Image (tube, rainbow, N blue to C red):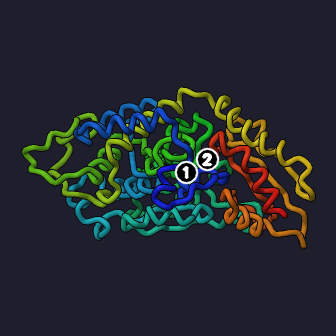
Amino acid sequence: MTIFERIGVPVIINAKGTGTRLSGALMDREVADAMAEAADYCVDIAELQAAASRTIAHVTGAEAGYVTSGAAAGLLLATAACVAGLNPSHMGRLPDTSGMRDEVIMVRGQRNFYDHAVRTAGVKIIEVGLPDRHAGAGVRDTETWEIADAITEKTAAIFYVAERYARPPLTEVTAVAHAAGIPVIVDAAAQLPPAANLKRFISEGADLVAFSGGKVIGGPQATGLLCGRQDLIMSVALQHLDMDFHEEQWQPPATLIDKTRLKGMPRNGIGRPCKVGREDIVGFLTALDRFVSESDAARHKKWLAKVEMIASDLKGLNGAALDLVGADDTDTVPLLQLTLPPSPAPSALDVMIALQNGTPSVHVDATYADRRLIHINPIGLREDQVALVAPAIRTALG
């Protein structure tokens, strides 16, 4: 019996992937052991974050880095850093942005519910462009000149959501932003693999980049990383760390926080609710080291073996077509795609609900249910669960 079953919570089979509501990806035993060891000791969290900064900087090519309580928390902290800078008074007032630069420019076609984290800092999002290519109304998307025209004396940052087909290209956006002295924040939460993306967005001029730590990196689910400019990461740290002690006691690590650049010691900031414990920081750093030590090809091979086994077990499935998506692309996570026959066969959503309600409970990716597509993602599948997926699907299909 698992620890979850002992407290009355059923264990599920996560064939959806890294979704937070399904606990994200699996964590390697080495990561869990590192977290357990960290729990036996106390350290100064600022010193630990300074050590993490050095590791993250080395891995990403950025000036500095920081471990956050997830990618969304990283977006909040990144926005707060761009708004408040190194001004302790501004830090203490957020999300009241009166008298500050408090507008963040964003491509209209990149808006999504995660930008709520950006707005939490008190800023107003300024949408630019028209996403004709997404709306099916044409081939164009937001263009660089539209971003340039939206920059004013109120602009605190440009927010860019990275994905394979994002437009305009990031290099064009950063060029426009830096010509105006404006930083660019990149949401790259799910942009791994490939591992090269850890350095890509910094090399393309981004000032702050947020990644999830609990997805492909394999760290604790409630972790993420921010990497970028030294001064902005310093602002992040100042608005996140526990600042509740006498100023005379304050001796932060100089590699993370340069006291000489401040007119005073900030109070607890807007990032204080986004606490990251020593166990999570150590677990994340252990997972990051494992991630960069393994090749994209090796990871892809392990994932592919899982979906190939499920595909083999589903051969002869009446009416449904089976395809391996991304089988030859080591820059992606390979998926097993089931295309259900046309109506009156059960809808994809009906099948997914039947899978969830079955024994064992199997959760799959519902992103394209309206196209009668079911996707099986291997990242959250334990080795002993792989053989259980195909029988569950056959049962759900009747």
User: Foreground: 129 or 395?
Assistant: 395
Q: Amino acid at mark 1?
A: Gly
The residue under the point 36% across, 32% down is 54
Task: Give the residue number, with chain letter if any, for mark 1.
Answer: 24
Indicate whether 48 appears above or below 82. above
Which residue is situated farthest in the left direction here?
A: 248
Q: Quadrant of the C terminus?
A: bottom right
Please give the residue where the numbered disc 2 appears in the rendered image. Answer: 380
Residue 397 seen from this side: yes
Mark 2–mark 1 distance (CA, rounded to whole Å): 7 Å
| Amino acid of disc 2 | Gly
Quick check: 216 above or below 77?
A: above
Q: Secondary structure at mark 1?
A: loop
Dot label at residue 6: none
> x, y (%) of residue 51?
32, 33
Does residue 15 appear left or right of residue 118 in this picture?
A: right
The image shows residue 233 at horizontal and vertical percentages of: 34, 45
